């Protein structure tokens, strides 16, 4: 077992040499960092990060009856979902969220009107479809963990 005091690695080489220890400490929930030059990176358990993002970013999803079906969207994001029923509209919105995350990572991350969406993109990428649906419905129980 790694010492609890070995949480901050002062170089990429130290982190690589002690990679298992780095992950073990990060898994405990302790602040764990790696420095590279003047940059510092945090190593965080993905499930913990996902739960925290879900708790800090309520979806505020809006649904509306539209043309005999339903539409769902997230204010402030350029996407929506449509379907014959609410489930289908949310499933379509989840697909749109996934496509947005791909686009954001490929080309939108530095666009001024998308740059601030880092947290939502991380939430999308760290979530499975069921977790995204629970988040959209404001029923994300994992956020309370």
Image (cartoon, grey):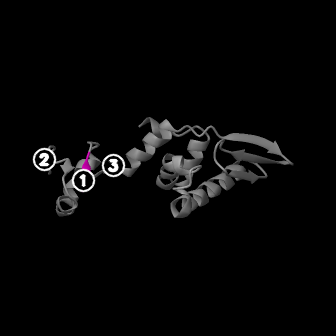
Of residues 90 and 14, the one drawn nearer to the viewer in this rendering: 14
Q: Is mark 3 in CB contact (under 8 Å) with mark 1?
A: no
Q: Quadrant of the C terminus?
A: top left
Nearer-N-terminus badge (1/2): 2
Residue 92 x/y as whole percent:
68, 55
Q: Nearer the viewer, mark 3 or mark 1?
A: 1
Residue lying at 19% horizontally and 63% vertically, measured from the top left: 13
**How far across and how far down the image is residue 40, in percent?**
29, 50
Name the side, left or right, on which 116 lies relative to 43: right
Q: Element type at marker 2?
A: loop
Compare residues 133 and 97 and report the one nearer the observer: 97
Instruction: List x then y, in percent, for residue 107.
Output: 55, 62
- Check the image and report above or below for 16 versus 130: below
Main SS, magenta region, reads strand
Q: Residue 131, can we see it?
A: no
Q: Position of residue 143 (x, y in %)?
A: 46, 38
Q: Which mark is residue 35?
A: 1
Q: In the rendered image, which residue does mark 2 sit on?
A: 3
Is residue 56 visible in the rendered image? The answer is yes
Q: Which residues are magenta?
A: 32-37
Q: Residue at x 20, y 57 (%)?
A: 11
Badge 1 vs badge 2, beta-carbon distance below 8 Å: no
Viewer-proximal residue, 83 or 121? 121
Which numbered circle lies on residue 44?
A: 3
Report crowding for label 1: few under 14, some 14 to 19, many 20 or more residues within 10 A (C-alpha).
Answer: some
Of labels 3 and 1, earlier in sequence is 1
């Amino acid at each position: 077992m790694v010492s609890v005091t070995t949480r901050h690695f002062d170089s990429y080489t130290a982190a690589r040499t002690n990679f298992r220890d780095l992950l073990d400490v990060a898994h405990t929930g302790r602040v764990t960092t790696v420095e590279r030059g003047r940059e510092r990176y945090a190593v965080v358990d993905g499930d913990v990060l996902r739960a925290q993002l879900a708790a800090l970013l309520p979806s505020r999803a809006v649904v509306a009856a539209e043309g005999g079906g339903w539409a769902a969207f997230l204010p402030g994001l350029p996407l929506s979902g449509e379907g014959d029923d609410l489930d289908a509209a949310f499933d379509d919105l989840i697909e749109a969220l996934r496509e947005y995350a791909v686009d954001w990572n490929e080309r939108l991350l530095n666009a001024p009107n998308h740059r601030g969406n880092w947290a939502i993109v991380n939430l999308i990428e760290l979530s499975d479809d069921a977790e995204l649906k629970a988040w959209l419905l404001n029923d994300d129980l994992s956020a309370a963990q």
